[in-house]
Image (cartoon, helix red, strand yellow):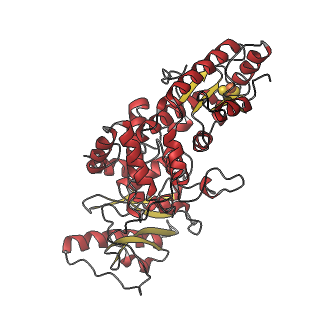
């Protein structure tokens, strides 16, 4: 391929005359790469500032690549591939288009300068368009100057963590919880325990997960039982005590069918997992509990969704009014202040991955953060490492996060992790009418597409 050597851009930059932006282009090999090749063989002139990285399809352009390019000093990134309808793998670019929409929104939420991330459709016959696009992009980035925000991030170490009031430091001797003094609560709790004991006795479930009151934590904690006589240790869940659906992925909890105490948050999470074929209807037996503590009974899937629907009242895309109010406040800030807000938030992260481990949706067999051959992003709890972790995680949860707040409750450093989820949930609802976990029949947001999905931002 005949493209001017990027070393020339480095040479110009070091000569310290005119600022020469460093640009990275992630392109599909079938269309845009061939278009760039055509520009080269046709001897079209365009600035040598761009490093071209070819991939099999736009569907293979992972946002981790884009973040890595920016954290390693790129001043601008462009992604490009076949025009809609021309993808060699049928729909890779339709899916990419949806992901680019969400990723741009995520960058905007963070206060990132959106002009530095551009998208284009360029076919193999459009050498002229490739040359013009790179010329315009280079000019624009040259005028903007170096992207100092990302470079500052590269020099940042994690800030000292302000300890939260309630941090659990030890493993005290186990004590049984006090039974509730309230007769109505006791009756509800006994009804739930009775239903689960009956299911364990008639072997319609092999085990059950629910909640027991932890006197140490002073709130319910998950409990896993396999025998009917253990059911009397079960109690009612609180309003925001994590999400039991995460236990479906626990490597030691593999028995099925599994009885599960479900509230609205668990039901939404199960809907998402079922959309993604990560759980089957027959794997889980549902014991539904309303937000006010009423035991609604052992219900089949659709009945549980319907019975718990009232608990969504007052919540926006599953998120509480308090979270929504904070998201509105942050999104109303000017972009530079938004960037500072998130930088401060991410600087507190100690990379304990409690947010991931408490999340019902984070269930990859090997998380991207744990892969080191190749290492997809820095694992240190510093500026680039924390930025990459939170952005990639938020993006992986776009259209999937149900707003249960388990991540926020688990974070020992008080990073506002669920705000990113709430902001992206707005984006998913606004662009695609998608509400995570509303029904198990919906298609997963990032695996689906419509041929008329918006693309006004793509050149
Ligand atoms: Fe070019 Fe899919 S093959 S976008």
What residue is shown at x 38% (from left), y 73% (from top)?
A: 167
Q: Quadrant of residue 260?
A: bottom left
- Residue 279, position as x, y percentages in the image: 54, 53
Does residue 459 appear left or right of residue 416 in this picture?
Answer: right
Task: Classify the position of the C terminus by image quarter.
Answer: top right
Task: Classify the position of the N terminus by image quarter.
Answer: top right
- Residue 277, position as x, y percentages in the image: 57, 47
Does residue 151 appear left or right of residue 374 in this picture?
Answer: left
* Residue 257 visible in rendering: yes
What residue is shown at x 59% (from left), y 66% (from top)?
A: 251
* Residue 444 visible in rendering: no
Q: Quadrant of residue 217?
A: bottom left
- Residue 13, position as x, y percentages in the image: 64, 33
Q: Between 401 and 284, which is closer to the camera in this rendering? A: 401
What residue is shown at x 45% (from left), y 68% (from top)?
A: 209
Q: Between 367 and 24, which is closer to the camera in this rendering? A: 24
Q: Between 293 and 244, which is closer to the camera in this rendering? A: 244
Q: Is residue 178 above or below residue 297?
A: below
Q: Is residue 397 above or below residue 408?
A: above
- Residue 96, position as x, y percentages in the image: 58, 31
Q: Is residue 362 above or below residue 396?
A: below
Does residue 170 appear left or right of residue 54 in this picture?
Answer: left
The quarter of the image that holds ligand 1 is top right
Q: Between 14 and 212, which is closer to the camera in this rendering? A: 14
Count of all numbered marks drawn on residues in the image: 0
């Amino acid at each position: 391929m005949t493209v001017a050597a990027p070393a020339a851009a480095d040479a110009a930059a070091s000569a310290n005359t005119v600022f020469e932006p460093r640009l990275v282009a992630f392109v599909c090999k079938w269309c845009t790469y061939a278009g760039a090749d055509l520009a080269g063989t046709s001897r079209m002139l365009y600035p040598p500032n761009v490093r071209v990285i070819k991939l099999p399809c736009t569907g293979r352009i992972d946002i981790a690549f884009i973040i890595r390019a920016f954290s390693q000093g790129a001043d601008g990134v462009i992604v490009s591939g076949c025009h809609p309808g021309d993808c060699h793998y049928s729909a890779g670019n339709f899916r990419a288009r949806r992901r680019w929409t969400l990723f741009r929104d995520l960058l905007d939420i963070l206060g990132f300068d959106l002009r530095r991330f551009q998208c284009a459709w360029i076919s193999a016959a459009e050498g002229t368009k490739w040359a013009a696009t790179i010329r315009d992009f280079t000019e624009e980035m040259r005028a903007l100057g170096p992207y100092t925000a990302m470079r500052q991030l590269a020099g940042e170490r994690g800030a000292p963590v302000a300890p939260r009031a309630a941090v659990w430091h030890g493993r005290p001797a186990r004590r049984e919880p006090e039974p509730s003094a309230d007769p109505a609560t006791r009756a509800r709790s006994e009804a739930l325990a009775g239903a689960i004991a009956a299911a364990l006795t008639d072997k319609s479930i092999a085990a059950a997960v629910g909640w027991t009151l932890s006197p140490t934590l002073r709130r319910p904690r998950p409990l896993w039982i396999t025998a009917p006589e253990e059911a009397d240790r079960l109690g009612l869940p609180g309003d925001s005590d994590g999400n039991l659906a995460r236990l479906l992925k626990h490597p030691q909890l593999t028995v099925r069918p599994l009885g599960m105490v479900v509230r609205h948050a668990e039901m939404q999470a199960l809907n998402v997992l079922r959309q993604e074929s990560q759980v089957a209807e027959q794997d889980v037996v549902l014991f539904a509990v309303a937000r006010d503590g009423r035991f609604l009974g052992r219900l089949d899937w659709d009945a549980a969704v319907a019975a718990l629907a009232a608990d969504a009242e007052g919540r926006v895309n599953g998120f509480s009014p308090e979270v929504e109010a904070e998201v509105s406040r942050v999104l109303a800030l000017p972009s530079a202040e938004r960037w500072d807000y998130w930088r401060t938030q991410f600087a507190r992260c100690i990379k304990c991955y409690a947010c991931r481990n408490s999340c019902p949706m984070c269930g990859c067999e090997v998380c991207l953060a744990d892969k080191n051959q190749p290492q997809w992003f820095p694992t240190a709890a510093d500026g680039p490492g924390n930025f990459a972790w939170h952005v990639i995680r938020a993006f992986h949860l776009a259209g999937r996060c149900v707003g249960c707040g388990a991540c926020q409750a688990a974070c020992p450093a008080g990073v506002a992790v669920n705000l990113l989820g709430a902001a992206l949930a707005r984006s998913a609802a606004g662009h695609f009418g998608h509400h995570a976990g509303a029904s198990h029949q919906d298609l997963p947001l990032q695996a689906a597409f419509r041929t008329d999905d918006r693309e006004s931002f793509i050149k």
